[in-house]
Image: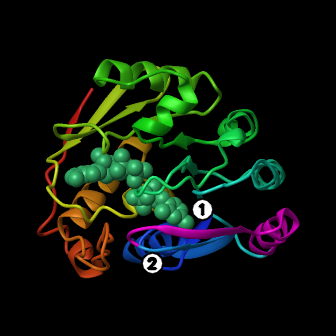
């Protein structure tokens, strides 16, 4: 069985973070493992408080996994402070795992910051160079690339700027744009588009977490990057289509093991382009 590790924050309400990642891993039939970087008291409406795990405890969790288990892919989510980023970066250097997917989480859907804004330089200098794939949404791509994004051309320019920071591939996600749900992948040479119908729902808590965890799962399963993104786009679109009206705010995506295993029967049409 393929084994995938998430290094991220815990969302006690189950829609995002470590919890969304582990549900996604199970739906893909891979063995999920987790290193908790922050404990977030949050729900579908608000973030109440954040407690960061001590950097040495983050390192020990990573050691515990890697000294014992071969890891086929790593998904990295919320890293709230420079010292957690440095702890994670040091261990990525030490263990050099394959297939690192980095979701540079900065804000929750309700606008609450999940990353200290002063940590962005550390993210860029210390963590981004380890990523095989970086998956910023539009506000995150704007912050990392230091530019405004108004259209698809701007998404492409931001992907090129972020690529120059040392990650191997960049996927700028269009969930925060208008029109169809268009994401752009840049591999340093070419752009690839992944386009799906925008679903009219407020229940999109955990979309970015789910998408990056699905990409990491598919890479662990041996897919090429383009195929991994294509399959993950089907997964997230279907997970949003079947999202759950749980809680009073933005409800979570649905991890539909049977639907997925049966070939996304009610699944999504994804248009790929270059
Ligand atoms: N309403 C929607 N309908 C269909 N796809 C969506 C919708 N909202 C987001 N997506 C897709 O979900 C994935 C996660 O994107 P996004 O919401 O931008 O990430 P994040 O959760 O990090 O803000 C992307 O593939 C995006 O295109
Ligand atoms: C613990 C934790 N990690 C990440 C997020 C953000 O999740 P994401 O899928 O990027 O987007 P929203 O859930 O905010 O829509 C989170 N909320 N909590």
Camera-side residue of 27 and 57:
57
Residue found at the far right of this picture: 56
For label 1, the crowd category at 10 Å Cα-Cα, with few meaning under 14, some 14 to 19 and many 20 or more, is many
Q: Residue at x 34, y 55 (%)?
A: 232
> How far across and down, in percent of the image, does residue 30 sit?
48, 73
In the image, 5: left or right of 172? right
Q: Up-down: is 139 above or below 47?
A: above
Magenta stretch in the rendered image? 44-67
Q: Which of marks 2 and 1 is nearer the N terminus?
A: 2
Q: Up-down: is 151 above or below 37?
A: above
Report the disc number at residue 14.
2
For label 2, the crowd category at 10 Å Cα-Cα, with few meaning under 14, some 14 to 19 and many 20 or more, is many
Residue under label 1, please give it.
Answer: 72
Q: How many labels does the image show?
A: 2
Is label 2's Cβ within 8 Å of ligand 2? no
Contact (Cβ within 8 Å) of mark 2 with mark 1: no
Camera-side residue of 141 and 261:
141
């Amino acid at each position: 069985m393929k084994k995938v590790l998430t290094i991220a924050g815990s969302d006690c309400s189950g829609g995002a973070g470590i919890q969304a990642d582990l549900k996604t891993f199970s739906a893909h039939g891979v063995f999920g493992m987790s290193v908790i970087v922050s404990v977030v008291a949050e729900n579908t409406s608000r973030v109440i408080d954040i407690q960061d795990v001590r950097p040495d405890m983050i390192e020990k969790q990573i050691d515990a996994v890697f000294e014992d288990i071969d890891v086929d892919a790593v998904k990295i989510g919320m890293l709230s402070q420079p010292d957690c980023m440095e702890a994670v970066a040091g261990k990525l250097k030490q263990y050099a795992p394959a297939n690192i997917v980095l979701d540079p989480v900065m804000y929750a859907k309700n606008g609450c910051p999940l990353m200290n804004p002063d940590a962005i330089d550390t993210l860029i200098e210390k963590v981004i160079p380890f990523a095989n794939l970086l998956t910023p949404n539009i506000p995150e791509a704007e912050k990392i690339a230091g530019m405004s994004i108004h259209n698809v051309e701007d998404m492409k320019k931001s992907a090129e700027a972020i690529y120059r920071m040392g990650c191997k591939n960049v996927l700028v996600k269009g969930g925060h744009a208008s029109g169809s749900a268009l994401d752009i992948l840049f591999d340093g040479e070419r752009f690839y588009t992944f386009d799906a119908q925008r679903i009219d729902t407020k229940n999109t808590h955990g979309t970015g977490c789910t998408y990056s965890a699905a990409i990491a799962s598919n890479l662990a399963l041996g897919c090429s990057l383009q195929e991994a993104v294509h399959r993950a786009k089907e997964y997230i679109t279907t997970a949003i289509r079947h999202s759950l009206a749980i809680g009073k705010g933005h409800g979570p995506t649905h991890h539909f093991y049977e639907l997925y295993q049966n070939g996304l029967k009610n699944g999504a049409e994804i248009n790929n382009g270059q």
